[in-house]
Image: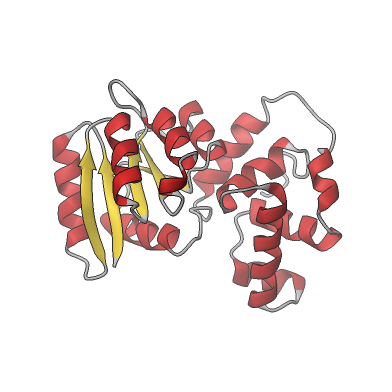
Amino acid sequence: MISIVLADDQALIRAGLRSLLDAEPDLRVVGEAGNGSEAAALAADLGPDVILMDIRMPGTDGLTATRTITADPRAAGAHIVILTTFDLDDYVFEALRSGASGFLVKDTEPAEIVRAVRTVAAGDSLLSPRATRRLVEEYASRAKPVGLAPQLDFLTDREREVMTHVAAGLSNDEIAAALFISPATAKTHVSRTMIKLGARDRAQLVVFAYETGLVKPGWTD
């Protein structure tokens, strides 16, 4: 059973999400929050698998809550999905940098929301929608150009290669096909890269790939 916390200041949106998710046999909403402070408290108390987090809420917003939750060892297993009205949003980019597993625009189809919850609960990130890559490229292109970060020296050539494919939004199976390796080997390379770089999940690998100069905006088109 995948446990979920809903964080949105609009009760109607929370009710709609609860109705959608609780109708699935493997999903269960265990808590609701109307602001970021409540979301952080629920994350610590309940240890949910997934948190659907509105980015803009009164008081403590979703960005601040994301930072709090990802830094709290009591919520180490929680995967955060940001809910936003606009796909290109500074707050969303900062949330990805802070450890969110991806984001969904609020007018996303119900079936896609259900799929997204299962995806992040399994330890994957919402990297397949091109909107995520557009978001990272948009704001990475505004950043001051930098040389390759010294952290990349800890990676093998293969791990760097795998990381560029992660930045392109490829799944483990797709990386395996591109590099002529097994999916299990691709998964191992991704996991080792995350450990070496201290990345919470694949979404942070994407951000890191751009910010360290390993991948340049536009390279993954």
In the rendered image, the residue lying farthest to the bottom is 182
Residue at (26%, 55%) from the top-left corner?
110
Q: Quadrant of residue 170?
A: bottom right
Q: Quadrant of the N terminus?
A: bottom left
Residue at (61%, 68%) from the top-left corner?
172
Image spot of residue 201 (x, y percent): 56, 52
Image spot of residue 152 (x, y percent): 81, 46
Please count the marks in the image. Answer: 0
Q: Quadrant of residue 114?
A: bottom left
Image spot of residue 38 (x, y percent): 27, 34
Q: Using residue 85 as the reference point, say whether residue 212 is left or right of it.
A: right
In the rendered image, the residue lying farthest to the top is 59
> Can residue 107 be seen?
no
Q: Using residue 138 as the reference point, say whether residue 160 is left or right of it.
A: right
**Colour style of the rendered protein structure:** secondary structure
Q: Using residue 168 as the reference point, say whether residue 23 is left or right of it.
A: left
Image spot of residue 9 (x, y percent): 22, 31
Residue at (50%, 55%) from the top-left corner?
125
> Can residue 9 be seen?
yes
Q: Quadrant of residue 69?
A: top left
**Between 189 and 71, which is closer to the camera in this rendering?**
71
Q: Is residue 140 depicted above or below 199 in this figure? A: above
**Between 38 and 201, which is closer to the camera in this rendering?**
38
